Amino acid sequence: MEKDIQTAKNLLKGINLSMTEVARLFLELIETSQATRLKSTEKIKSHCRHVISLGVKAKEMEEKTVPFKEAYEECLRAKAHRSAYTLRDIRYIGERLMRETPGLAERPTRAIGVEECREMLERVFTHAPQRKKARSILSGIFSIAKKRLWCEKNPIEFIDIPIVKEKEIIPLTYEESMKLLETASQPKFRACKPAIALMMYAGIRPEEIKRLRWKNLDLEEREIIISPTHSKTGGGRHITIYPPLYQLLKKEFPRNAEESICPKQWSQLWPQIRKKAGFHHWQKDVLRHTFASFHVKNFHNLPLLQSLMGHRDSHLLRSRYVNLYGLSRKDAKKFWQLSQSMLTNK
């Protein structure tokens, strides 16, 4: 017994723990790991060694992390294949959070908790739509960090998605649509007419139209190719060029297919066209909504429209895009059969 005590003292040299403290720690290990149910001494020792090994690995994982800024940069690298629109949003949200939250950039990712994230989102982004987007992007950053084993869990999963009350977007009437095209036919605005027609007759998003080039239009096959890098959602799609759009586009097709659909003065001319056509208030996606509503009213094919719009399912179309109130079959038919005067540029 005395020999065992002396051996134990020798083993504990340099460790600032008494034999009593070591015994208590070992007893705690046995009890908390349920080793007391084991009868064999060898089994108890083997069990404790295994628990200690697991604890060491868990401790190493707990300490493995990187600063938030590095996790944000890794997220950008991992999503480099996504559209420029998506990457722009990630940069904006990530950099704004780090700019307006002192110490966040250097803070260990593993140490950032649920309440800290909730407070940060509510303080930096005061409007629900902004906060919803920021929550999604921040969740993406933590998801990448979790995959890299830089944090144990994604704290954003425990934060409710903000409820956003979407404003109803009422599509243009047939008369308003024609007035817009008529205004765009004027010499000063003629270069903008193809872009407007593509938004109105193909449902191209405002941000997508700015990235589109003439080479993305195949007039022979009568389709528009939206590549993943041009798409808002990062998914490519092919859109049918219907007869009125075909007639409008074939008159404008340039010699150089590398040219952008939007002219260089687009950002100045587009608001002028809207104002001259009588639109003093303009909702960003109204032409996309106009396309969707007139398409359903005339073709009665929701699955086809879903594909053309680039939606994963028809829920968004039913709940947000298609508004047939006050839209007649007669007007829908006229919308898809442009008059000759509208096909010419005056």
Image: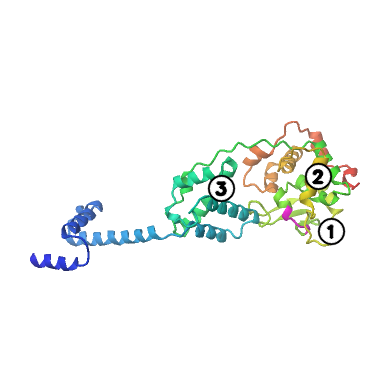
Report the residue marked by disc 2: 272
Report the residue marked by disc 1: 254
| Labelled disc at residue 17 | none
Magenta residue span: 210-214
Q: Position of residue 50 (x, y in %)?
A: 28, 61
The answer for how far apart the CA atoms under marks 2 and 1 are is 24 Å
| Labelled disc at residue 134 | 3
Q: Amino acid at mark 1?
A: Pro
Res. 241 visible in picture: no
Around disc 2, counting alpha carbons within 10 Å, would you say few (fewer than 14), some (14 to 19), or many (20 or more)?
some
The relative height of residue 259 versus residue 268 in the rendered view (above or below) is below
Q: Which is nearer the eye, 328 or 147? A: 147
Q: Is residue 146 left or right of residue 32?
A: right
The answer for how far apart the CA atoms under marks 3 and 1 are is 40 Å
Q: Are marks 3 and 1 in contact (CB under 8 Å)?
A: no
Position of the N terminus by quadrant: bottom left
Between discs 2 and 1, the one toward the N terminus: 1
